């Protein structure tokens, strides 16, 4: 009997799992031929893509271990989710055959009354409806994916929707970190910066929690500990005593949503003390460019921004090599007064004193002052370091964030403030600072949005509603589907396909997601019956990551790059299709196979080895094509190692980015002053007025679209309006769970790790609990302006007295889940939704609430 059966025998109390293992073992037709094997692959239980080794005996997975060969590149181990992955594969509650809904009523408590159907019937049903939609208006199809992006690569669904003709492909990034990405894009023309922890001496973390669950976790956690061992100081700034805070030298419990004021106070003190990198600001950024009274940049007849040349006492083009550009001051040009972008920043912060920051953020003024001195001293402004023979700018301070500054109504501006803090000490692409990911790779991000109207897309991305939403707006879709005319959409969506994503569960104010899903024919591709399936008409089973082939993503680090595959270890229930081959079959039955092939070659950027028309491919064969073109090594290397990696030279690490892209004549500059936001706002105003749009507040957009972050961005809508709700409500992620639902059924994550993992709690400060008469373990109600959620209290010193915290991926409610998977608090139903008006980011951390005993 396999590992799962053995596990049941040592006290998990899961005879159903044991029976499933027996069934899978009986179905393993190749077990006698395989014997004992170690098969290397890549975990995709989360987005860290750790290397794994699956130990297989007689065709059954017995255990999963980390692939030690990858430790030198990006992951030193695997987490409990990774270890427990085989239980998802042998899960008896898995979807094993296509399912058809027979109950036309859709709702949280409605039994879909599933019946199993054949694959052929499922494909006939689906392609029949798709063919009618394509003949009418292809845009009426909406494709959603969440984690599905990482199980097959989003180039496959992107190619499919392109061949089909719909613009509507929507990823989940606005429930994750979209605001961070867009802040990067508006500032330096790309996204995906990382701290250079090998050389960092002072590391500030604003709500980044790699010790719990986050992108780059399995590199960041180890890199942070290595840094601390050599003396790096780590300061965590967030309202909750997270696992990251537990590893830190200091925890600063800031008030939720007020980070931007605290950061700007640090910036002001650095500037006032003169401890900034003037050379970096004048050479690499647009801080010297002249801004008029209307907020627009002064430009010459060729459209080039102007600076004030201190030598000639006149305006010159920003990239004039002879000009000595002024960083500070106001100047008169052709009878009008202009300030440098830097001066605009300085003037905007004049009232943001440490005392004001203390009043708003709760951080003592004395600590703001002392931290500023620490930053200034540790930044070593003007210093250089020789690495591998290359003289490199050395700024060993990094201020980093991920979801902490992002999941807010003003997430972009919070992130922009943090980028400006890093900018002031000149640490971008410097040793020990922030390393950018191909700056200026997308110069279009530095321009104003076209603010499309009427919108083409159902999520309103890049429209007048979300002008800079370059990562889709997943939570908007159902609102638009429910009432497309309200947003000017010229069609009514008819079908939604959901691939490994769980929108009715995972967004803020989540219950409202259901209204749109009741109006369309819904198809879900997944491994378990999630909340999305609850509203679906057709469900197709997928293979787990231990059963499928995939040209897998990895997590490149500042010093390494790599390529990897996932390969089929078993097929526990002999399921004949995975998502890749489902898409292939759909394209073939719809007569789109050759068009799909063309789009695949485009989306993947294939050059030497390409997909060929007139033939079919298995999943493995598709991966072979991608490996041959991208890696250019024999596929036997992939099968044996599942991975190839290389280190990045110091030259490419530090001298390939801003040194090449942002320095010198004709080169773009990093945007301290994001003037394109003002241009976008002007277009929003014109579009609203020209079209009589009434469901968009220009006053709110005016606050959001400032070229410089301001103190106004510390006051999201609930903080201003929910006066009768005294407590701040924040959310966070625990590494045991995701929102897709498959972890909710995993017995290791629900039983073997103890009660701490099987359900979440509502973290309440012990003093607050005592004041309210609430004891540890009491059942309480969290009430907000949009809903209520019930849960168990955990009294702790590790949360601010004015704040409660709840992890946002427990309390599953699908009728397809067993009871043990439904434990915990589903807090998303009570969270207010006020998306960032720049990028559409979901505002998970802005809600105010009441708390009382149930």
Image (cartoon, helix red, strand yellow):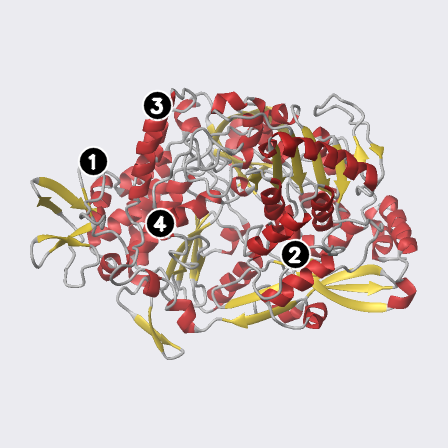
Nearer to us: label 3 or label 2: 3
SS at badge 2: loop
Decide: few, some or many residues near mark 4? Use Cα within 10 Å; few <14, some 14-19, many ≥20: many
Task: Give x and y (percent) for residue 447.
Answer: 34, 45
Q: Earlier in the sequence, mark 3 or mark 2?
A: 2
Nearer to us: label 1 or label 2: 1
Task: Give x and y (percent) for residue 257.
Answer: 42, 37
The residue pinned by badge 3 equals 690
Q: Are marks 1 and 2 in contact (CB under 8 Å)?
A: no
Q: CA distance from mark 1 to mark 2?
A: 53 Å
Q: Are marks 1 and 3 in contact (CB under 8 Å)?
A: no
Q: CA distance from mark 1 to mark 3?
A: 22 Å
SS at badge 4: helix
The residue pinned by badge 1 equals 294
Q: Earlier in the sequence, mark 2 or mark 4?
A: 2
748 horizontally vs 632: left or right? right
The residue pinned by badge 4 equals 187
Which residue shows up at 41% across the image and 56% down it? 441
Decide: few, some or many residues near mark 2? Use Cα within 10 Å; few <14, some 14-19, many ≥20: some
């Amino acid at each position: 009997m396999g590992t799962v059966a053995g596990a049941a025998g040592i006290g998990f109390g899961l005879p159903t799992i044991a029976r499933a293992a027996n069934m899978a073992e009986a179905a393993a037709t190749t077990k006698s031929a395989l014997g004992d094997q170690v098969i290397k692959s890549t975990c995709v239980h989360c987005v860290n893509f750790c290397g794994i080794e699956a130990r297989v005996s007689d065709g059954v997975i017995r255990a999963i271990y980390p692939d030690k060969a990858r430790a030198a590149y990006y992951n030193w181990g695997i987490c409990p989710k990774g270890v427990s992955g085989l239980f998802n594969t042998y899960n008896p509650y898995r979807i094993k055959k296509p399912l058809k809904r027979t109950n036309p009523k859709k709702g949280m408590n409605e039994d879909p009354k599933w019946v199993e159907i054949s694959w052929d019937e499922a494909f006939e049903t689906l392609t029949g409806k798709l063919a009618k939609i394509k003949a009418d208006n292809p845009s009426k199809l909406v494709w959603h994916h969440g984690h599905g992006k990482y199980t097959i690569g989003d180039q496959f669904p992107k190619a499919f929707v392109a061949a089909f003709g719909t613009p509507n492909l929507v990823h989940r990034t606005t429930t994750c970190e979209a605001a961070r990405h867009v802040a990067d894009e508006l500032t330096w023309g790309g996204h995906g910066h990382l701290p250079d922890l090998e050389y960092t001496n002072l590391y500030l973390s604003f709500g980044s929690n790699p010790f719990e669950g986050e992108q780059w976790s399995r590199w960041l956690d180890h890199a942070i500990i290595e840094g601390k061992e050599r003396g790096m100081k780590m300061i965590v700034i967030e309202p909750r005593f997270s696992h990251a805070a537990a590893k830190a030298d200091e925890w600063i419990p800031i008030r939720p949503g007020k980070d931007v004021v605290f950061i700007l106070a640090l910036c002001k003190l650095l500037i006032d003390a003169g401890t900034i990198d003037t050379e970096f600001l004048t050479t690499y950024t647009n801080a010297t460019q002249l801004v008029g009274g209307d907020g627009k940049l002064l430009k010459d007849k060729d459209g080039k921004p102007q600076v004030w040349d201190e030598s000639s006492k006149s305006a010159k083009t920003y990239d004039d090599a002879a000009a000595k550009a002024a960083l500070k001051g106001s100047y008169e040009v052709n009878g009008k007064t202009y300030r440098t972008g830097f001066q605009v920043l300085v003037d905007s912060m004049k009232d943001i004193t440490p005392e004001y920051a203390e009043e708003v953020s709760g951080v003592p003024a004395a600590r703001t002052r002392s931290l500023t001195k620490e930053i200034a001293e540790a930044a070593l402004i003007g210093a250089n370091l020789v690495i591998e023979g290359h003289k490199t700018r050395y700024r060993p301070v990094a201020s980093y964030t991920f979801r902490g500054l992002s999941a807010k109504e003003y997430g972009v501006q919070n992130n922009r403030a943090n980028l400006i803090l890093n900018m002031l000490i000149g640490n971008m692409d410097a040793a020990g600072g922030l390393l950018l990911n191909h700056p200026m790779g997308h110069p279009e991000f530095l321009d104003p949005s076209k603010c499309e109207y009427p919108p083409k897309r159902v999520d309103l991305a890049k429209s007048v509603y979300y002008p800079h939403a370059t990562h889709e707006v997943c939570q908007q879709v159902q609102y638009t589907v429910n009432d497309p005319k309200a947003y000017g959409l010229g069609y009514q969506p008819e079908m939604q396909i959901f691939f490994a994503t769980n929108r009715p569960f995972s967004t803020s104010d989540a219950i409202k997601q259901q209204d749109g899903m009741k109006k369309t024919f819904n198809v879900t591709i997944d491994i378990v019956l999630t909340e999305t399936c609850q509203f679906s008409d057709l469900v197709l089973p997928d293979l787990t990551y231990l059963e499928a082939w995939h040209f897998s993503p990895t997590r490149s680090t500042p010093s390494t790059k790599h390529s990897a595959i996932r390969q089929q270890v078993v097929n526990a229930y002999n399921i004949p299709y995975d998502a890749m081959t489902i898409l292939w079959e759909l394209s073939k039955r719809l007569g789109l196979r050759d068009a799909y092939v063309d789009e695949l070659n485009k989306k993947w950027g294939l050059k030497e080895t390409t997909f060929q028309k007139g033939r079919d491919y298995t999943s493995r064969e598709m991966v072979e094509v991608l490996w041959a073109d991208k890696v250019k090594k024999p596929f036997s290397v992939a099968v044996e190692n599942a991975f190839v990696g290389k280190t990045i030279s110091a030259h490419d690490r530090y001298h390939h980015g801003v040194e090449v892209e942002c320095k010198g004549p004709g080169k773009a500059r990093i945007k301290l002053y994001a003037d394109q936001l003002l241009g976008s706002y002007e277009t929003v105003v014109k579009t609203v007025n020209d079209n009589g749009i009434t469901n968009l507040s220009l006053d709110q957009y005016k606050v959001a679209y400032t070229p410089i972050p301001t103190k106004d961005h510390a006051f999201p809508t609930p903080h201003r309006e929910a006066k009768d709700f005294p407590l701040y409500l924040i959310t966070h992620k625990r590494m045991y769970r995701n929102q897709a639902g498959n972890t909710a059924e995993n017995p290791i994550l629900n039983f073997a790790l103890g009660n701490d993992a099987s359900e979440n709690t509502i973290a309440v400060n012990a003093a607050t609990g005592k004041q309210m008469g609430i004891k540890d373990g009491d059942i309480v109600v969290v009430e907000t302006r949009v809903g209520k959620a019930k849960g168990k209290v955990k009294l702790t010193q590790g949360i601010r007295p004015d704040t409660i915290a709840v992890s946002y991926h427990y309390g599953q409610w699908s009728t397809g889940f067993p009871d043990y998977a439904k434990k915990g608090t589903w807090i998303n139903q009570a969270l207010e939704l006020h998306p960032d008006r720049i990028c559409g980011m979901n505002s998970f951390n802005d809600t105010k609430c009441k708390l009382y005993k149930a």
